[in-house]
């Protein structure tokens, strides 16, 4: 089977009808079960939010605001519909810190679809080098790999010598992690005269230019990328067509003018704003701070959902270092701790 499920190839009009039909109930759920949306959507009739035009009239909550919102209402800023207990398997901290819940549903982050498009199948052994410490990336990848029948080695980050020992002994045929750490592993393996058995790779957390993909392909590694966040889970993923990233089946994506909630013209670069149907963390019009643009037409791979061009930069001053966000407020905190320093700039 070339597609994860039949939803990927359905008529686009039917997909839009189904998603918009789900929207009023999700708006009502968010308003009823979370303090934040009870406030933000207080004067909204959920039944009236049944079109993209109506959705575009709702306020955008941006990731850049979430840090301060969570400081004012721990742990999740009033945006989560769940607390501690059976519904919540784990809670994570991304840099900031910004806290994120992980529910108990299989493939909670919905990344199995992206793993399947990348060629991951039952019987693969995945060497997962995303962090298992505090941040959710390791769990995001592991739960997705399990959902498509893979076995996972939880390598985590760093400790390259021990990781190479495990690769030599276990012979995993698949890699999950950042492209930069994959390059480090390959270079160290080359220096040691060691063959690396990876035949496929799933990368995220960093830019993945064509030059890196081509370098991996020259070594026999077929690599795919996905766009996901700790707040939303999967947003879009690469398919074998290699033409942009296909939007996930369980989110509504808008591209808006940065600093506003106004949708841009098709093809224009803007901020990625996502509405999720996650009942545990029902984010409505969540501004990721990432820039992208919609691509015209459908993918040649047969998947009929809309596509985006991929990550095109940031709409704010937040940046990523080795797959982890660094916020301007963190730099300001360092300055406050050292009064003798009048000005500072972070150079990445």
Image (tube, helix red, strand yellow):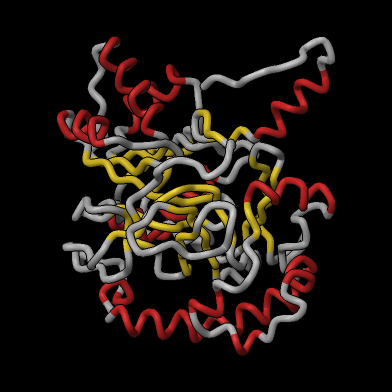
- Give the residue displayed 18% in from the left and 29% down from the top: 219
The quarter holding residue 45 reads: bottom right
* Residue 51 pos. (x, y %): 49, 82
Rendered-image quadrant of the N terminus = bottom left
Instruction: Please count the marks in the image.
Output: 0
* Residue 106 pos. (x, y %): 51, 64
- Give the residue displayed 41% in from the left and 85% down from the top: 17
Q: Residue furthest bottom?
A: 47
Left or right of 165, for residue 303: left
- Compared to residue 43, the image places residue 115 above or below, namely above
The quarter holding residue 337 reads: top right
Left or right of 304, for residue 27: right
Left or right of 305, for residue 37: right
- Give the residue displayed 71% in from the left and 30% down from the top: 330
Q: Nearer the viewer, residue 128 or 12?
A: 12
- Compared to residue 31, the image places residue 340 above or below, namely above
Q: Nearer the viewer, residue 161 or 80?
A: 80
* Residue 143 pos. (x, y %): 48, 54
- Give the residue displayed 62% in from the left and 62% down from the top: 60
* Residue 250 pos. (x, y %): 46, 70
The quarter holding residue 236 reads: bottom left
Left or right of 19, for residue 281: right
- Compared to residue 197, the image places residue 45 above or below, namely below
């Amino acid at each position: 089977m070339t597609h994860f499920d039949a939803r990927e190839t359905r008529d686009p009009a039917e997909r839009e009808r189904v998603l918009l039909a789900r929207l009023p109930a999700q708006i009502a759920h968010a308003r009823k079960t979370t303090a934040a949306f009870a406030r933000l959507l207080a004067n909204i009739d959920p039944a009236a939010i049944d079109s993209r035009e109506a959705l575009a009239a709702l306020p955008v909550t941006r990731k850049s605001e979430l840090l301060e919102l969570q400081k004012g209402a721990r742990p999740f800023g009033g945006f989560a519909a769940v607390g501690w207990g059976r519904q919540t398997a784990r809670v994570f901290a991304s840099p900031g810190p910004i806290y994120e819940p992980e529910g108990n549903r299989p493939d909670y982050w919905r990344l199995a679809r992206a793993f399947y498009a990348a060629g991951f199948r039952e019987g693969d052994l995945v060497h997962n080098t995303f962090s298992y410490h505090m941040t959710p990336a390791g769990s995001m990848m592991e739960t997705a790999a399990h959902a498509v029948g893979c076995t996972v080695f939880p390598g985590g980050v760093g400790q390259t010598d021990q990781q190479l020992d495990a690769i030599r002994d276990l012979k995993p045929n698949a890699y999950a992690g950042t492209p930069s750490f994959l390059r480090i592993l390959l270079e160290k393996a080359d220096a040691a005269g060691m063959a690396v058995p990876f035949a496929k790779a799933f990368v995220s957390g960093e830019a993945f230019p064509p030059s890196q993909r081509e370098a991996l392909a020259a070594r026999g590694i077929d690599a795919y990328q996905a766009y996901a966040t700790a707040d939303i889970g999967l947003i879009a993923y690469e398919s074998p067509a290699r033409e942009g990233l296909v939007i996930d089946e369980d989110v509504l994506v808008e591209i808006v003018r940065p600093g506003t909630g106004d949708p841009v013209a098709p093809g224009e670069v803007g901020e990625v704003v996502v509405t999720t149907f996650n009942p545990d963390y029902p984010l409505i019009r969540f501004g990721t701070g990432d820039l992208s643009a919609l691509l015209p037409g459908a993918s040649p791979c047969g998947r009929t959902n809309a596509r985006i061009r991929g990550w095109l930069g940031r709409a704010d001053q937040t940046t990523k270092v080795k797959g982890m966000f660094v916020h301007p407020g963190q730099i300001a905190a360092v300055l406050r701790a050292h009064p003798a320093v009048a000005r500072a700039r972070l150079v990445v």
